[in-house]
Image: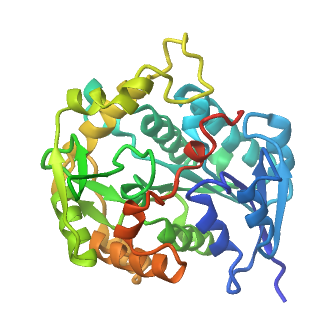
Amino acid sequence: MTARKTIFVIGGTGAQGLPIMESLTAPDSDYTVKILTRDTASDRAKSLASLPNVTLITGTFASEEDLRAGFTGAWGAFVNIDGFNCGEKAEIYWGIRSYEIALECGVQFFVWGNLDFVYKESGYDSGFRTGHYDGKGRVGEWILTQNKAAQTAKMGAALFTTGPYIQMVIAKRTPMAPKVIDGVLTWRVPLGRGAVPHVDLGDCGHYVKWLFDHSEKAAGLDLKVSIAHVDYDNLAEAFTKVTGKPARYEDISLEEYWAEPARAAIAKQPAGHNADPLDPATMSFQDNFTGFWNMWKSSGGNEGVIRRDYALLDKIHPGRIKSAEEWFRREDEKGRLQGLGGLWDRFQSDSSQHVIKGLEDGRKGRL
């Protein structure tokens, strides 16, 4: 029997990490997983500890000692640093150090949890600057460049590039969280005629396991995933088709978006809650998410700033979610089976849930 390969994971308790850990520890998996977490007593950590072949390590990505302890003895690594915890500047530093220390410790295949380097993709237009995207994207591009050097040939590397989770369109306190207005579920966002390449969290596990299962083939690959470029007229139509309840998309200006009281209250706060607000490198929520919406406003029809190769994704994951309607239908059925009610029922009872770990934690986690 072939010995299991060990994968060290940073970001295992996050929204993306949970389904990825389930996939890496599934019955058809040949991996054991070491997960770095600041709090082994948290509900999310306990949930992961109940999975087979999982070990929790107490520590932080912002510690070389903890990184060495995790990378030592591991064949592979999946590193997804929470930029909303540390901020863009620290993510760039610790992303680079994670790669370097993994190489130093003998890791053979390294997967970086990535986002699009939109500032570069836009032709370095400052209106598109999005700190939590650009921080990851810079590190990702650097990793693929390093991966070509003779000194780093002993460790393959790939990027797993995602985007806004489709779960965020019905979750609490996300940038696109809807409200029921006059009996109509309404998404009021500054998207224009653009589109968001939403990602299904449930598909993430398949993609990341594929990268590790095909490490030689995947080395040097930037796997950019999405269910589809979703325009929000289509999103509203899909919700109505699945639930039979009214929904609409209302395009608003950035000024209207930031005038909403809950957003106005945090607009000037650091996007990364542990970032120094006095550091000129720190982006505010408003600056960060203004670039975020400009990015999607300019990505309609998979022909703009941010694009995806859906033919490639169909080859890698033929059973992937391919539309907002398909996802709504699955989520509606799942909620009913879990006793949460259908999608419309959740909004009527205000029982929609958090998706993003940082929001669930009240943006209070330490580095």
Q: Quadrant of residue 93?
A: top right
Q: Position of residue 291 (x, y in %)?
A: 31, 32
Q: Position of residue 248 (x, y in %)?
A: 17, 57
Q: Position of residue 355 (x, y in %)?
A: 52, 55
Does the image show residue 267?
Answer: yes
The quarter in which the N terminus is drawn is bottom right
Residue at 24% in and 53% down: 186
Q: Position of residue 305 (x, y in %)?
A: 24, 45
Q: Quadrant of residue 184?
A: bottom left
The quarter in which the C terminus is drawn is top right
Is 82 above or below relative to 10? Answer: above
Pick the front one: 302 or 190: 190
Is 100 above or below relative to 163? Answer: above
Image-based side of 114 in relation to 263, left or right: right
Image-based side of 58 in relation to 216, left or right: right
Q: Residue furthest left?
A: 193
Is 125 above or below relative to 347? Answer: above
Residue at 67% in and 57% down: 12
Image-based side of 112 in relation to 313, left or right: right
Is 67 above or below relative to 229? Answer: above
Residue at 48% in and 22% down: 269
Pick the front one: 267 or 312: 267
Does the image show residue 225?
Answer: no
Pick the front one: 105 or 304: 304
Residue at 43% in and 35% down: 134
Image-based side of 164 in relation to 32, left or right: left
Q: Give the image's coloring scheme.
A: rainbow
